[in-house]
Amino acid sequence: MLRAYRADLHIHSILSPCTEITEMSPRAIIERSVQIGLHMIAVCDHNSCENYPALQAASRTTDLAVLAGMEITSQEEIHILGLFDTQESAFAVQEVVYKNLPGENDEKTFGCQVVVNEHEEVISFNKKLLIGATTLPLEAVVELIHSRGGVAIASHIDREAYSIISQLGFVPPGLTLDALEASPSMGLDEARRRFPALASFPLITSSDAHSLDGIGKSSTAFLMAAANTREMKLALAGREGRKVLGVR
Amino acid sequence: MKLKDVVERLGLKVVAAGETLDKEVAGGFASDLLSDVMANSREGDIWVTLQVHPNIIAVATLKDLAGIVIVQGKKPEEQTVEKAKQEGVPLMVSELQTFELVGRLYNLGISGMR
């Protein structure tokens, strides 16, 4: 049966060096998401999904659906969200990302990259330069996400940095993105006005939250039969009765 | 100054559309944000960038730029070279980094001001 899922598909945890260390633990993210009535989330840390196991574990006693996510930085410094159904798929993609991600994190400059378990115990500090860019061209990133059945979404297309529009001027013809994401500050109507050439792409919004009170600040409602990537692709394409209901 | 003179004097490696080097270089522009190049470059500019994505060719065509120089010896993507050939956009590579290359272009009399 089809039902509405209110989803925030772009949240950062303490694994992202830019995120408040004390606040964005997997458990806290799950609790906050449930509290504000979200049905589905994805935590997309920069070039990594190592906190997904903790998120999944922390969500087990709730009805919240948690996709495995990652915000991959292409060679052109474009941020692309990859959403997956399973840890196995996400970790396989992460392995390719890691192989193509040079550099080491400087905690003093960029902040700590904390991997935790569902009890908020620190497991490790990730040493890779997660804030950096991979050496993978944009097309290769989208292909990599799709190779594991993932949903590929271009992040915050209206931002002046790290967006497909800022870096490349326009969406390259033939690029098989599943959707584009507009920032909370912009909203879909304004995004459609400002980027009329992008009318052929489904648009979503999400919060890009780096703090607990940012979660759900902007979200997208999907009409789907279940909270998984297959259903989401149908909804984004507007097929088989699935669709994007709206945003807020 | 003609593009072919720039190529010769700065030792640029031409990777596509070498038959179109007869173009006049009217000025210069350096940026790695294609949105910026679309907004602010001018016809006849030689464009210095480290981006290698195929979109650089479309931007150069759109703005009628004299040519593109990729810096730091970076290898353009295959599709980029293909498109450059199709569109007749001179595509060159320099081993130098942007600051140094732009300085040398400036020394040849190529300016960002018109």
Image (cartoon, coloured by chain):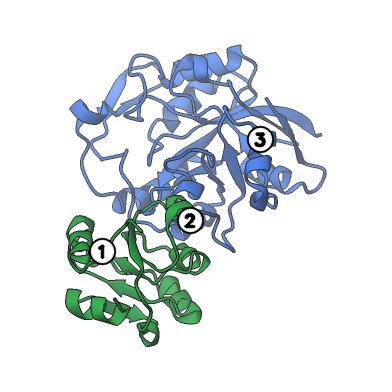
Badge 1 or badge 2: first in the primary sequence: 2
Q: Which residue is mark 3?
A: A190
The amino acid at mark 3 is Glu
Q: Chain of mark 3?
A: A
Q: Nearer the viewer, residue A118 or A43?
A: A43
In this rendering, would A248 be left or right of A42?
right
Pinpoint residue A146: horizontal percent, then vertical percent: 54, 54
The quarter holding residue B56 reads bottom left
The amino acid at mark 1 is Val
Q: Which residue is mark 1?
A: B71
The answer to whether residue A234 of the structure is visible from this angle is yes
Q: Residue at x 63, y 27 (%)?
A: A219
In this rendering, would A4 be left or right of B68?
right
Q: Residue at x 37, y 57 (%)?
A: A136
Identify the secondary structure beneath mark 2: helix
Q: Colour of chain A?
A: blue
Crowding at label 3, few (<14), some or many (≥20) Cα neighbours within 10 Å? few
The amino acid at mark 2 is Met
Q: Colour of chain B?
A: green
Crowding at label 1, few (<14), some or many (≥20) Cα neighbours within 10 Å? many
Crowding at label 2, few (<14), some or many (≥20) Cα neighbours within 10 Å? some
The quarter holding residue B8 reads bottom left
